[in-house]
Image (cartoon, grey):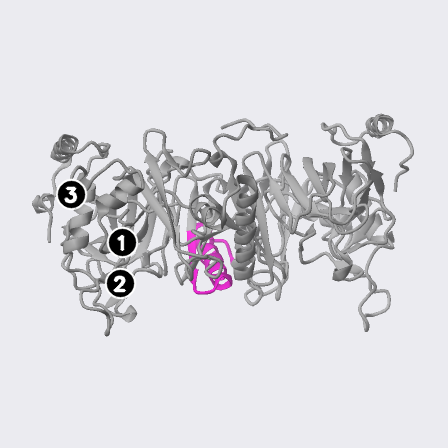
Amino acid sequence: MNITASHRPPTPRLPRLLSAAVCVALASASTVLPAVEIPYDFHVRCTPENSIFGYFSATKKPVLTIKSGAVVRIDGGGGNKWGEDADPDAWLKQNGVPLTVESNEALREIVTALKESPHRLPAPPGSPAGTRIGGHFLIGPIYIEDAEPGDSLEVRILDVTPRLPYGANGARPGGGGLPDLVPRPYGHVYKIDLKRNAAVFNENIEIPLAPFNGVNGTCPPDSEGPNRRSSAPGLFAGNLDSKDLVAGSTLYIPIFQKGALFYTGDCHAAQGDGEVAGDAIGTANTVVYQFILHKGKTLKGPRAENATHYITYGLDPDLDQAMRLALIEALDFLKEKEGLDFLPAYSLASAAIDFRVTQIVDKTLGVHGMIPKKLFVHDTASSYWYRP
Amino acid sequence: MIAHSTSLRRRTLIFVTLLAAAGASRAMEVPYDVHVPFTPENAILGHFSSTKTPVATVRSGAVVRIDVGGGVRWRDGDPNAWLKENGIPTTIEQCPALAESIRVLNETPNRLPPPPGSPPGARPGGHMINGPIFVEGAEPGDMLEVRILSVTPRIPYGTVSANPGGGALPDLVPRPFTKVVHLDLKRNAGVFDDQVEVPLGPFMGVMGTCPPDSEGPNRRSGPPGVFGGNLDCKELVAGSTLYLPIFQKGALFYTGDSHAAQGDGEITVNAIETANTCTLQFILHKGKTLTAPRAETPTHYLTFGLDPDLDGAMRMAMVETVEFLKEKQGYDFLHAYALSSIAVNFRVTQVVDKTLGIHAMIPKKLFITDPDRYWYRTREN
């Protein structure tokens, strides 16, 4: 199901800015939430048709078809911690969130999408009648014209902003990084204060906001099966849960399907490296992404970049192996960038690259290598698109 | 080995005077009470001993400057020829740290016996370490706070080596390899080549109390443990604080394994290996028992996880973090666990010391009602 703006033909520079101005005006008229300030070409809304829960599909109809270079605003869902059959308003009230579904456009969209989206995995055989399978709240796919398997997709993350004034996370026995130590299911609701850039844990503790989407990926290859579940990340990226993918960063992803078929979701307001309890601060984000197609540039796995670092990823069910893969990727990167052979690259990595735990809770665990750009003294910082 | 009879203050004066008279290459900017030079007697290679005579005995609160050697990478060749060949603008005669290192390697009695079957004259090496420092009044079950006041390289270079069978990619290293990195202290830069420079962040890879008797009499210094030791944690630069459990009377603090800079992971098994002098303040906390090392910087609290398996190390770091948050904020497990997920960063300390490390970085700025009482002041960028 396409959204209205997607029917517009790609517009030249001036009209594009005008159209963005119209969208901003519309947004400010219809909602009290912060205006999205970055101009965009297309707007994908959080509707039942655009939503998909907990998996990636190569056959779902694209929500939008774009040319390389297009800037797309995508409204995501999330924050729906009230449970499949519970009353959202009662849950909001109980947790001190001063909103109702009726009064808030984002919540209205989220509740409607949850209720009406046909894009859910079938319930396993033997489930009670009416069982609905959940999972990551995703939007997509976006079809990029001319994209073919073997190409790569550059996703410039221009903006990420929470749409809700709260986020939530929790833990459950059997899940997360300490599955055996969690005595009972637990939920925590955080007030999100965009003005002060803070998530309020309690009166003594506040977490600086750093919103990002946990899931950003192209559609997995056919070898991963027809309805690949979204929980475990892979070479197509997906649920990387990489806290560095905030506004100003860039994600590079291999393409495995015609049109790339980009999906995003699993909206986070902030997260620590590791995501140890299994959840970041889950909320609903609006993102503004620019998509740039690189024909014939083949990547083995996802990479990323921000104003200060190049980032490589290692993904494996075993953390030791994930570390090894992140390291080998970093050495490959140094080979490509500086022509460094294995031994000098290995030495440099030991002296100057930081390896961090991305997450240990998505079955396929992640380690990422942070390669500081300032190591390369002749490179000019100004070649990167984002100015910090 | 230094006498402990004179008052700390007087001794400071004597040492500062001696330094100035001897034309020491760099003025030490942090005042100290005791100076432990790197001598064959003070040095110990590759292990910790609970029976070695202390190099200094100090009261809680004392500030100690400790010199350590390093940089000896010429194997059987001529040192000055090696220095020249690598473009290092010094000689053994001009550089006290190198002369001390050579003397220690030739003369120190404090090394492990050669393994059975070694050729005659084999002399085992290992980390260059200085110690132990005996802290008066320290008993097993107490805690030692080590404030890291300064860490400065003593030689104008460092080296990074890789060997087949070692490091994080033991199967992929085709031959032994050593890279020399020039240290430009003025510019705080490690010069890797014409295109690449690494910002310096000098720290001691090994800082620890003497391991408990349960670890054996001459515990090798390779793997870190709950006593600290070879933590190889790049955060432990000047301005940070390490907290260590005490397992032996007098704590018996050792330090060594001088690093000029390192990435989280330390993947080849080497940082930029150099020779440092460090100035440390020791504060004894009677009756404060720790189960594992902890640390603190101006901006973060750190907990450590140590295990032969990285998943196991991660788990220990998580449990330590949850424990820290429970102690600090009075949380139950679930609140601490939830907060850890969203605001604590878990990083790979090293994957090359047999016992691998993960450290958790808990930002201080989370605790909005805490006053800043930390001893070290940094400028905000």
Q: Which one is nearer the viewer's eye here, B7 or A223?
A: B7
Task: Please tell me whether residue B181 is drawn above or below residue B351 in the rendered image.
Answer: above
**Stretch in magenta:** A312-341
Mark toward the start of the polypeptide (1 vs 3): 3
Residue type, label 3: Phe
Q: Report whether residue B196 is seen.
A: no
Residue identifier under label 1:
A83
Residue type for callout 1: Gly
- The residue that disc 2 covers is A256
Q: Quadrant of residue B10?
A: top right
Task: Please name the residue shown 73% across and 53% down the image.
Answer: B127
Labels 3 and 2 within one chain: yes
Near mark 3 (Cα within 10 A), the count class, few <14, some 14-19 or many ≥20, is many
Q: Is residue B71 magenta?
A: no
Dot 2 alpha-carbon crowd within 10 angstroms: few under 14, some 14 to 19, many 20 or more: many
Which chain is mark 2 on?
A
Asked whether residue A319 is drawn in magenta, I would say: yes
Q: Position of residue B40 (x, y in %)?
A: 86, 48
Residue appearing at x 15%, y 60% in the figure:
A118
Left or right, residue A335 beside residue A298: right
Q: Specify whether disc 2 shares its chain with disc 1.
A: yes
Q: Position of residue B333 (x, y in %)?
A: 49, 50
Please give the label number shown on residue A259.
Answer: none
Image quadrant in which you'd find residue A22: top left
Q: CA distance from mark 1 to mark 3?
A: 32 Å
